[in-house]
Image: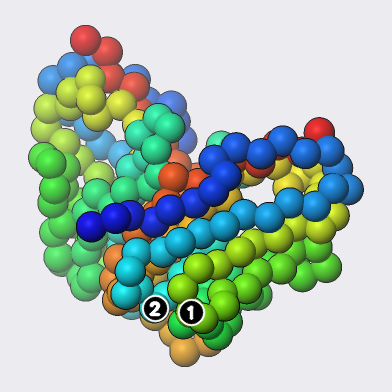
Amino acid sequence: EAGVAQSPRYKIIEKRQSVAFWCNPISGHATLYWYQQILGQGPKLLIQFQNNGVVDDSQLPKDRFSAERLKGVDSTLKIQPAKLEDSAVYLCASSFSWVEQFFGPGTRLTVL
Amino acid sequence: GDSVTQMEGPVTLSEEAFLTINCTYTATGYPSLFWYVQYPGEGLQLLLKATKADDKGSNKGFEATYRKETTSFHLEKGSVQVSDSAVYFCALSESKETSGSRLTFGEGTQLTVNP
């Protein structure tokens, strides 16, 4: 069974630029999550989708971050404009049930 | 709100030593508890889980018991190997109407096992 796919794996941009990350969840998983993991910290949930609807985006900085999940499958997370403090690993996860989430390899973002 | 506190790291052990990584939590309801592991250059992997009080999760020689009275979920292994070197995250999930099933993670504990 294929795992959660993410791209790109690495991205370096300058502050005030925009960036987008892509996630393809495990086939059949209705729930998709985006987490931000700052170096030395645990992951923090940014947004959770159930099919193509948003369940929880309470910790998403909506002035610069946006996410969508068209057709309830793939998802894109965008940052515009990026700040230095956005440097982190962005993890995508998916789940079939609420008990276990499967994580992708992550995208490491460096903002200069 | 929900929170998870892990013992501070990093932890360095010799091969075959006993491992304990402490984890305590704060939650309003009855959460499920998890240990995730992150090997260098890889994504998070579920190591073990427990969904109710007194449950014991186990996998690959690791164990953790859900202790409601002490709000703890300590990770243990009797004899660590070099291949266990990784970052370990304790996490909880409360399934709620308003917040779905988000995972709340601890800060992570870096484990290094030397031959």
Q: Is residue B92 at all visible to an observer of this figure?
A: no
Which residue is drawn at the image coordinates 23% and 70% (left, top)?
B51
Identify the residue under disc 1: A72
Q: Which mark is residue A30?
A: 2
Report crowding for label 1: few under 14, some 14 to 19, many 20 or more residues within 10 A (C-alpha): some
The picture places residue A93, in percent across and down from the top left corner, at 43, 61
Q: As shown in the figure, which amino acid type bears the numbered disc 2?
A: Ala
Say if mark 2 contacts mark 1, CB within 8 Å. Answer: yes
Q: Quadrant of residue B10?
A: top left
Question: Is residue A6 or residue B60 the one in the foreground?
Answer: A6
Q: Quadrant of residue B49?
A: bottom left
Report crowding for label 2: few under 14, some 14 to 19, many 20 or more residues within 10 A (C-alpha): some
Which residue is drawn at the image coordinates 35% and 59% (left, top)?
A102
The picture places residue B47, in percent across and down from the top left corner, at 24, 49
On the rendered structure, is B55 left or right of B5? left
Question: Is residue B26 or residue A78 the one in the foreground?
Answer: A78
